[in-house]
Amino acid sequence: MTDTLTLTRPDDWHVHLRDGDALQAVVPHTAAQFARAIVMPNLRPPVTTAVQAVAYRERILAAVPQGVSFTPLMTLYLTDNLPADEILRAKDVGVVALKLYPAGATTNSDAGVTDVRKTYATLEAMQRAGMPLLVHGEVTAPEIDLFDREAVFIDTQLIPLRKDFPELKIVFEHITTREAAQYVAEADRFTGATITAHHLLYNRNAIFTGGIRPHYYCLPVLKREVHRLALVQAATSGSDRFFLGTDSAPHPTHLKEHASSCAGCYTALSAMELYAQAFDAAGAQDKLEGFASFFGADFYGLPRNTGTVNLRRENLTLPESVAFGDATLKPLCAGETLPWRMV
Ligand code: DOR
Ligand code: ZN
């Protein structure tokens, strides 16, 4: 047990940066923590072409503070009609992956895929090009219990998809269940998974402690303690199938603290502090660097970062809120004191 951790600069393999004023507010937080981040394409309208991805990347880069080195890695939003020939154009401009949102699964997913079979020609092109598919792994059928949607997705969608595309690189994003951790641990090298800090630190009780706490509401929703423990086990196992993805998803305070609260936890402000807390609590400090700094880059076939960051066991009190355009943004654990800080 040490009180200082020195890690190779980490990357965030799943983040939401939004656009406009919101983008200006959040990019500095992610850029202060990570060397690179995979940026989700669920804007309104979604990022569906190589040309749009390049323009979005320019807007992100313009929001990076002077003197900070940060590389946004771009994705396209898979729809029922994204043409297969867009894949090579995307690859040419440096797009690193496509994101599959089942239609209706989450924030800005109405343009998502209604039936994965409709995307098969595009998936063929992706498999050929070595372009990874990033999956929001939840079914959307209203008759399926919200807490079962990930496990049902594995059986009804992911297993058949994998059979049809044995060499398509798939990242099962923000996994939340023992079933998903087990599926990925037993899969071959074409499958990886991201795990958020909040799913390592909290179970579903957090959403209901002393009243409804909307800042703990995200999708896929927090699950039971057995699932949290399975995720901690996976993240700290040293397996290179599991890597860091914050799924930091900013929504203005007034839409989080709302009768139908938006899904998303804003963790970018103190992401590495939260992960350090989770790994330290599991007695697995030595496993953080692989998870945060190596395994994602290796999966994507990108070079590992150079340079280091330091985390110290030292109190860090988070602000109650930060500016977010004309609104405010509450980070997860707003006003609370965390046990680790990045120095
Ligand atoms: O909680 C979530 N928020 N889950 C998602 O899948 C999307 C994200 C967002 O964009 O707000
Ligand atoms: Zn996400």
Image (cartoon, rainbow, N blue to C red):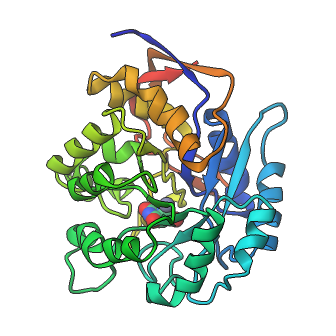
Split into 4 quadrants, where in the image is the N terminus?
Answer: top left
Relative horizontal placement of residue 204, taking residue 269 as reference (left or right)? left
| Rendered residue at 63%/20% (across/down) | 308
On screen, residue 28 above or below 284 = below
* Residue sitting nearer the eye, 239 or 279: 239
Percent position (x, y) of residue 141?
29, 85
Instruction: Pick whichever, 243 or 5, lies toward us.
Output: 243
119 sits left or right of 144 in the view:
right
Check the image and report above or below for 16 versus 139: above
Q: Position of residue 342 (x, y in %)?
A: 54, 23
**Vertical comparison of 2 with 259: above or below:** above
Q: In this rendering, does residue 287 appear at all?
A: yes
Q: Quadrant of the C terminus?
A: top right
> How many callouts does the rendering have?
0
Asked if one can make out residue 210 in the rendered structure from this viewpoint, the answer is no
Q: Position of residue 122 (x, y in %)?
A: 60, 81
Q: Which residue does the image show at 69% across and 47% down from the upper left?
A: 27
Residue visible at 20% across and 50% down?
A: 227
Q: Quadrant of residue 276?
A: top left
Please tell me whether residue 310 is drawn above or below residue 130 in the rendered image.
above
Residue 296 at x, y = what percent?
53, 43
What residue is rendered at 53% in x and 34% in y?
Answer: 294
Q: Please tell me in which quadrant of the rendered image residue 208 appears.
A: bottom left
- Observer-nearest residue: 154 or 64? 154
Q: Nearer the viewer, residue 6 or 192?
A: 192
Instruction: Quadrant for residue 285, please give it.
Output: top left
